Image (spheres, rainbow, N blue to C red):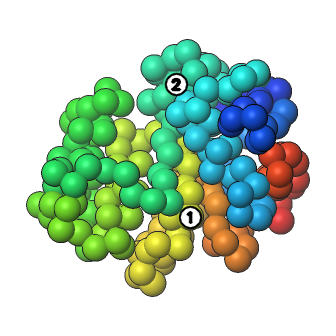
Amino acid sequence: MTNLLDVRNLEVQLGKRFTLGPASFAFGRGIVYIEGPNGGGKTTLMRALAGELQPSAGTVRVCGRDVHRSAEARRDISFVPATPELPDFLSVAEAYEFTAAIRGMKDWNGRQYLEALHLDAALPLGSASAGQRQKAELVCGLAGDPQVLLLDETFTHLDGAGVDVLEHWVAQWQQSRLVVVTHHGGPPVPPDFTLHVEEGRVESRSGV
């Protein structure tokens, strides 16, 4: 089976005091749980995997393409941040339509996800609650059906009904995508693999 995510000797330098890596691992379909203490480098790793942070060394390949060199690779991976980042002036529908267009899937329709999450497509993000904004970020993360989905504390910020829905989706995606999650207090869903990240060091483990 072809790896959806292939990381080789990845290092990320943040200023003079913090270095992530070197890290090497590869995963196909399934669920990966990233654990470790606050400030250990979990979010830094996710942002590097998504192509948002440039590495000082090493490579990240998504579906065989270098995520830091290939726009096509970045369409196949999405990062859902713990703190919502979508602009206030967009509605929920405008946000996911814009994201889908960037990923080359302008006809992608996220209405089924909005309905499952009880989220109004016309809701302006500037008027949305924190939970509603997190749901909007999640739907934008799904826009275009990326093969690799990075969820940074997404379960933490959802209400009980939203958690149930996301758990159901992740169980379905386990056979067709790679889902990478962080979550305080243990994995929200049983993972196939675990990455332990602490003080910039990344250790790959099987299961929990």
Category of crowding for the residue at label 2, using alpha-carbon neighbours closer than 10 angstroms: few (below 14), some (14–19), many (at least 20): many
Question: Residue 72: image x %, image y %?
Answer: 46, 21
Q: Is residue 164 above or below residue 13?
A: below
Q: Is 10 positioned to the left or the right of 52 in the image? A: right
Q: Secondary structure at mark 1?
A: loop
Looking at the picture, which amino acid does disc 2 mark? Ala
Q: Nearer the viewer, residue 70 or 11?
A: 11
Residue 95 badge: none
In this view, which residue lies farthest toward the bottom?
160
Residue 176 is at least partly visible in this image: no
Label number found at residue 73: 2
Q: Please give the label number shown on residue 153.
A: 1
Q: Residue at x 22, y 60 (%)?
A: 125
Q: Disc 1 residue type?
A: Glu
Residue beneath the point at 77% across and 30% down: 11
Q: Badges 2 and 1: C-beta atoms under 8 Å apart?
A: no
Q: Secondary structure at mark 2?
A: helix
Query: Crowdedness of circle 1 by 10 Å Cα count: few (<14), some, many (20+)?
Result: some
Q: Earlier in the sequence, mark 2 or mark 1?
A: 2
The answer to which quarter of the image holds residue 113 is bottom left
What residue is at 16 percent from the left and 51 percent from the top?
89
Is residue 143 depicted above or below 188 in this figure? above
- Kindly identify the residue that appears in the image at 35 percent across and 30 percent down: 103
Q: Quadrant of the N terminus?
A: top right
